[in-house]
Image: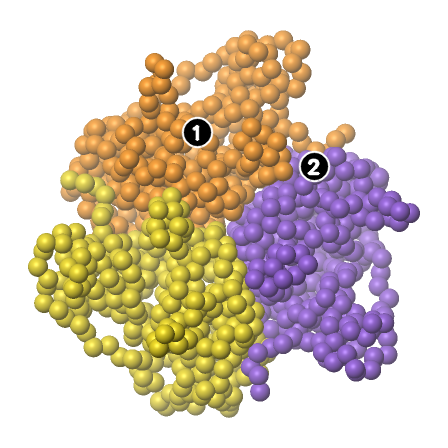
Chain colours: A yellow, B purple, C orange
Amino acid sequence: MSKTYPGNFFEDFSVGQTLRHGTPRTVTEGDMALYIALTGSRFPLHCAAPAAHAVGFERQTVDDLLAFHVAFGKTVADVSFNAVANLGYADVRFLGTVYPGDTLRSESTVIGLKQNSSGKNGTVYVRSDTYNQFGERVLTWVRWVMVHKRDEALAAPPAVVPELPAFVPPEHLPVPPGLDGRQYDTALTGSPHLWDDYAVGERIDHVGGMTVDESDHTLATKLYQNNARLHFEDHLMKGSRFGRRLMYGGHVISVVRALSFNGLANALRIAAINGGAHCNPSFAGDTLYAYTDVLERWTLPGRDDLGALRLRTVGVKNAESATVAGAKVNRDGREIYRDEVVLDLDYTVLMPRRG
Amino acid sequence: MSKTYPGNFFEDFSVGQTLRHGTPRTVTEGDMALYIALTGSRFPLHCAAPAAHAVGFERQTVDDLLAFHVAFGKTVADVSFNAVANLGYADVRFLGTVYPGDTLRSESTVIGLKQNSSGKNGTVYVRSDTYNQFGERVLTWVRWVMVHKRDEALAAPPAVVPELPAFVPPEHLPVPPGLDGRQYDTALTGSPHLWDDYAVGERIDHVGGMTVDESDHTLATKLYQNNARLHFEDHLMKGSRFGRRLMYGGHVISVVRALSFNGLANALRIAAINGGAHCNPSFAGDTLYAYTDVLERWTLPGRDDLGALRLRTVGVKNAESATVAGAKVNRDGREIYRDEVVLDLDYTVLMPRRG
Amino acid sequence: MSKTYPGNFFEDFSVGQTLRHGTPRTVTEGDMALYIALTGSRFPLHCAAPAAHAVGFERQTVDDLLAFHVAFGKTVADVSFNAVANLGYADVRFLGTVYPGDTLRSESTVIGLKQNSSGKNGTVYVRSDTYNQFGERVLTWVRWVMVHKRDEALAAPPAVVPELPAFVPPEHLPVPPGLDGRQYDTALTGSPHLWDDYAVGERIDHVGGMTVDESDHTLATKLYQNNARLHFEDHLMKGSRFGRRLMYGGHVISVVRALSFNGLANALRIAAINGGAHCNPSFAGDTLYAYTDVLERWTLPGRDDLGALRLRTVGVKNAESATVAGAKVNRDGREIYRDEVVLDLDYTVLMPRRG
C-alpha cells in the first residue's frame, strides 16, 4: 500500500462526511513575531500585551488572520490538495480568542457537491471548524473548491448546493467575552477615528504599499503549514500557465489587512469575513496596495461600547490605490475585475464607539 | 475628514511639542529569534539565558539594537514619514535592560527647528524617549531629519538648533543595575580579549561579510514596525532616483554589529551611540563588511569590573574590509566617503576588565 | 595581538585535544516557529503541545534537526572555519529531548588526523558532544573535514584514522525516557501507517517539493549561528568556482526531512544519522524533492510500543523524485551520483508500533 497521501479527489467526498484534519498546531509568540515580520501588522491587540489587557484580554491575542491561516492550512491536505481552484468563502466567523500557547485543530464536513458539466471535476462545499485545546470552537467557515476527479468515467453524485448567507448579520457577529470597548484608548494607535466617525459609502485610501518577495510569501505559507504545491514548487510551476509560484491568496489578505491600519487603525478585531474573491493572481515582486469602502455601519445588540463596520477592501497590485477608480471595469459590455485588482474582500470588523 | 494619517510636515512641528507615538510593542522570544536569523548575531547575553544570568540578569536580554529599532520604528509615523532624509543621531543612550515580554512605547519632544533656505523643507530635531510597561525609561536619543513643508508659502519659524554632545562622556554611560563583569567567562564567546587588551588607535578587521537580500531587510524593517515607505514599496521606488527599495539604515547597523563579533566578541552591551552617518545607500544583494577603530578606552566611575570602549565602526559594501584603507578619500580637494562605505558609526560598548 | 579569530588550521589540531566551543544558545519557541517557516515541517511532536504531552513529553519538543543544526553551528568557528570540505558524518545520536528554553553548548574532541599527500591540507576527525543547561548530553556525533594548513612546510603528524560504525545498531539507538508509543494517535497526522506497515526494500516517493530561495537558506543558517562564510558572502563567492553562495547542507537535510512527512508522517523522532553525503551542491532557486528507501526494520530491545526504521532518503533538485530511478548512475564504468542528487542520507527514525 502506498504510504504517500494523494489527497481526496471529487469522488472521495460525500455529503455529510466529516474529515478530521491532521497536524494540530500550537501557535506561539514565535509565530506572532513572524507574522509581524511578514506583514508589518501594527494592530495593537496582537502586538502589545498591555493594550490587550486594558480591553479585557489576558494578554496579547493571536492575530485573527494568523489563526485563520493556520486553521485553514490544516484543511488543505484533505480538502484542496487536488483542487483546480478555490472558488469562494462564506460565513467566516471568528468565534473565540486565540492566545499564544493555544493549540488549534480543524475538521470539515462536506455540505455540498456538484459535478461540473465537463465531467472532469466538481465543486465541493465544506464547513470547516477549528477548536482549541479546551474543545472550544474558535473559528468556523464555509469554502468551496473545484476538485479534480480521479476517474472521469464515474457517474455524478446528486447535486447538493448549500444556501449560504451573503454576509454575517450583525446579530450573529461574535464578540469575545470580556472585551470592553470603553477601556480602549486611541493613543494606542495614534488614530482618533472610531466607529462613530465612519460613514457608509466612505472610501478610505490606505496610501502605503508593500512589495512581497518570494521568501516572504513562501515563509508565510510554510508557517501556516499549508502544503498546497503551487505556492512552493518553482520547478513544477515553471510548467504551469503562470510560469512560476503563485502567492497564497490568504497571505494577500493578511498584507492588505496590515496596510489598512492607515485609515482603520482602531478596527480591533475581525468578526467575520462575508465573502471574497482572489480576482487576479499575485506573484513575488508585486507591490500590494489597498483601499476600503465602508458598506455598513451596524450597532451591536446590547452594546454601546463597540460597533461593527462591514467593509469592502480592494487589494491592488503595482498601482497606487488612489489611482484606481474601482474594482471593476466594463469591458465589451461585461463588468470584470481590473487587471491590477487581486482581492475583493467583504468583511466585518469591531471598532470601539465614543462613550 | 480623511481617515488616512498623512504624517507631519515641517509646519506641523513646534519647539516644545510632545508627540506620543502609537502602537506600543511587546518584544518577545519570537522577535529575538528573528533578530538572530536576520543578523546572525552571536553576542551571548542575548542568546544564552545562563550567560545573561551569570552576570546578573534575570535571563537573556533583548539585543540593544533590536530594542532600539523597535523603539525607533514607533517614531517614524509622526516624525519622519514625510522626511527627505535622516540627517543624524546624537546622545543615544541604552538606559535600561529590556527583557522578552517587556512592552516598549515611545514619545518625542521637538527640541529644534530650522527651515532650509530653499523654503521647501526644514530640519526637525527631536529627543525621543522609550519607556517599558513599568514606566521606566529604557532608551533616549536625539535625531534630526529634513522634512517637507506642506505649504511652501508659509513663513519660517524662528530657527532653534539644539546643542548636542559630540559623544556621551564616560560618566554618563548607563550601566545596568546588577551587571557584574567579574562573573563574565570568556569561554562564552571563545574570545580571550577583554577591555584591558584593546589599545586606542587599534584597528580590528572583522573579516567575514554578510549579503543582505530583499526579504532580509524588509522582514527586519517590518518586524520593527517601521513604516517608512521607501524600504517596502518597489513600485514606488522604481520611480525614485535609486530605482529600487532602500535598505533601512538601522538594519545595516545591526548587521555590522553582528559582524563585529569577530574581534569584539566580549563587547557585552552597547551603552551609547555617539553619532553616525549612513554614507551611501545599501540595497538588496549588497555584501556588508566592517572594520573598527578603537577611539577611546575609558574606565567607568567606581567600577573595576567593566570598562568602556568608544569605537568607530565602518561598514563597507561589496569590498572586503581589509582592502579598504579608510572611510574617506580626498577627491578634488575634498574629504568624502568612499563609494563603498555605507556606515560610519561612533558608539560605545561595555566590556569586562581583567580581575 | 590580532583580535580577530582566524579559526584553526590543520596543524592547530592534535589527537586528544578538546575544543570548548563558544556562544551557547537558548533555543526558544521563536526558533521553533522560524524552523517551521523555513522548512514547512509538520511533525506533530514539534508543533503541537498536546500531541507531545500525550506520548510522555512535558510539551512540544524542539525538532531534532533544529537542535542538531544549532549544536553543529557552535562547532564551525573552531573546527571547520578553514575547511575545504565537509567529508562525512557518522554515529550521530539524538540522546536527549530538547525543550524550548533549553540552552545548548557544544564541545569537540579531536579523534583523528591524516594529512593529505599534497601536503596542503588534511582530514580532521572530531567527536562533538552537546550538553543542555543541566549538563546532560543531548547530542553526539562524529564528523570529518578537510582543513587547510597554514604552513605547508610543516611535517605531517602521525596519521590516526578512527574506526567508525557504518550505522548505529538498534541496541544503541536512544529512546527518550518517558516516550510511550502506545499513547500515539495516528489522527495527529492523518496518516495510518505505523512501523509494522513498512517493508524493507520499499520505496516511498514523497511527491511534493520545495523551492529554497536565497533568504530561506541564509535565514536558516544564521538562525543556527553557523558562520561558515560560503553560505553568506555573495561578494566572496562570486570569485569561487560556484559563482554564488552555497546552501548549508544541513538545511537541505531539514527540508528533505520536512518533505518526507508525506509518506513517513508517523516517524516521530530521529534517533540516529548513520551517515550522509552532500552529493552535489544546492543553490538558491533549486526545488528540492525526495524519496526514501526502507533499509532496515528493527525492533527495539524491551519495547513493543516503538520500532525503528533505518532509511535512506535521497534528496533531488529540480526533478520530481518519482522521475529519478536511483541515486547513482554508471558513467564510464563508474558508479557516480546523478547530477540532480544533492543528498544521500542514511538515518534511523522511531515509529510507533501497532498495539
Residue C120 in view, yes or no: yes
- Say above or below: A349 vs C268: below
Image quarter where the N terminus of chain B lies is bottom right
Give residue A165's position: percent from left, percent from top.
Answer: 26, 79
Question: Residue furthest toward the right?
Answer: B333
Give residue C177's position: percent from left, percent from top.
Answer: 33, 40
Q: Quadrant of residue A21?
A: bottom left
Give the chain of mark 1: C
- Say above or below: A257 vs C89: below
Q: Quadrant of residue C197?
A: top left
Q: Is residue B225 left or right of residue C180?
A: right
Q: Residues within 10 Å of mark 1 (few under 14, many from 20)?
A: some
Q: Residues within 10 Å of mark 2 (few under 14, many from 20)?
A: many
Give the chain of mark 2: B
- Specify the label residue C116 is tagged with: none
SS label for mark 2: loop
Amino acid at pointer 2 = Glu
Question: Residue furthest toward the front?
Answer: A332
Q: C149 or B215: nearer the eye?
A: B215
The residue to which callout 1 is attached is C280
Amino acid at pointer 1 = Asn
Q: A334 or A217: nearer the eye?
A: A334
Residue B43 in view, yes or no: no
Marks 2 and 1 belong to one chain? no
Give residue A110's position: percent from left, percent from top.
Answer: 18, 65
- Specify the label residue B320 is tagged with: 2
